């Protein structure tokens, strides 16, 4: 073999750890900068809950701890399935209308974080996770911050 063949075919690619880290952070920042109109379009394309039902997006835990440990995809999937906190995306037209059943009024509104039973509702897979359709009486309570619930209970 000639020297030219060896030098061109055996050049190892050098990865710069710091450069890779910056690229990773840029990707994360781009994902955080989601346009509000795009979010509204995605929500509009989700199913409309009928009757007394609610459409809830289960809480997704962070992929990294504060210390920098990264959870495996399997652990994240298990946490998503086992979660019992969710964000109310849509409320059906008849939800909380029964005055006998709900004399105090609605238990939650759109854009509230709610707590529900682990296996409550119907699961609908979507890209990147799932949404659940719950009956209005399956909501157990509301929370201000689901992160707080994970760390202190």
Image (cartoon, grey):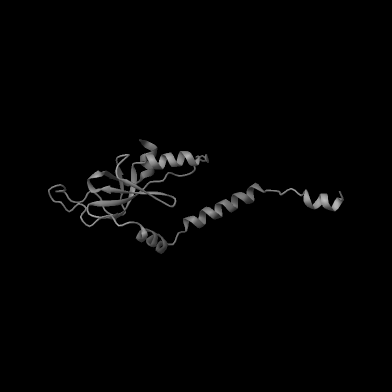
In which quadrant of the rendered view does residue 84 lie?
top left
Tell me what residue is drawn at x 40 percent, y 64 percent. Answer: 37
Q: Is residue 106 visible?
A: yes
> As drawn, is 106 to the left or to the right of 133?
left
In the rendered image, the residue lying farthest to the right is 2
Q: Is residue 65 visible?
A: no
Q: Position of residue 42 (x, y in %)?
A: 39, 59
Q: Position of residue 65 (x, y in %)?
A: 48, 41
Q: Position of residue 50 (x, y in %)?
A: 25, 55
> As drawn, is 143 to the left or to the right of 31?
left
Tell me what residue is drawn at x 76 percent, y 49 percent. Answer: 11
In the rendered view, tell whether residue 72 sits above or below residue 87. Answer: above
In the rendered image, the residue lying farthest to the top is 153
Q: Position of residue 85 (x, y in %)?
A: 34, 44
Tell me what residue is drawn at x 18 percent, y 51 percent. Answer: 105
Tell me what residue is drawn at x 12 percent, y 48 percent. Answer: 100
In the rendered view, tell whether residue 29 sits above or below residue 75. Answer: below
> As drawn, is 7 to the left or to the right of 59?
right
How many numbered callouts?
0
In the rendered view, tell whether residue 86 sits above or below residue 34. Answer: above
Q: Quadrant of the C terminus?
A: top left
């Amino acid at each position: 073999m000639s020297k030219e063949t060896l030098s061109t075919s055996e050049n190892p690619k050098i990865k710069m750890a710091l450069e890779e880290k910056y690229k990773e952070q840029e990707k994360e920042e781009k994902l955080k900068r989601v346009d509000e109109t795009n979010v509204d379009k995605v929500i509009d394309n989700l199913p409309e809950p009928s009757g007394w039902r609610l459409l809830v997006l289960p809480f997704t835990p962070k992929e990294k701890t504060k210390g920098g440990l990264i959870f495996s995809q399997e652990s994240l999937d298990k946490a998503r399935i086992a979660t019992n906190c969710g964000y109310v995306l849509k409320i059906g037209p008849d939800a909380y209308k029964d005055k006998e059943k709900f004399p105090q009024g609605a238990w939650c509104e759109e854009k509230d974080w709610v707590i529900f039973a682990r296996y409550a509702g119907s699961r609908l897979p979507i890209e990147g996770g799932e949404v659940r359709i719950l009956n209005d009486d399956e909501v157990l309570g509301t929370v201000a911050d689901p992160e707080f619930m994970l760390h202190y209970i």
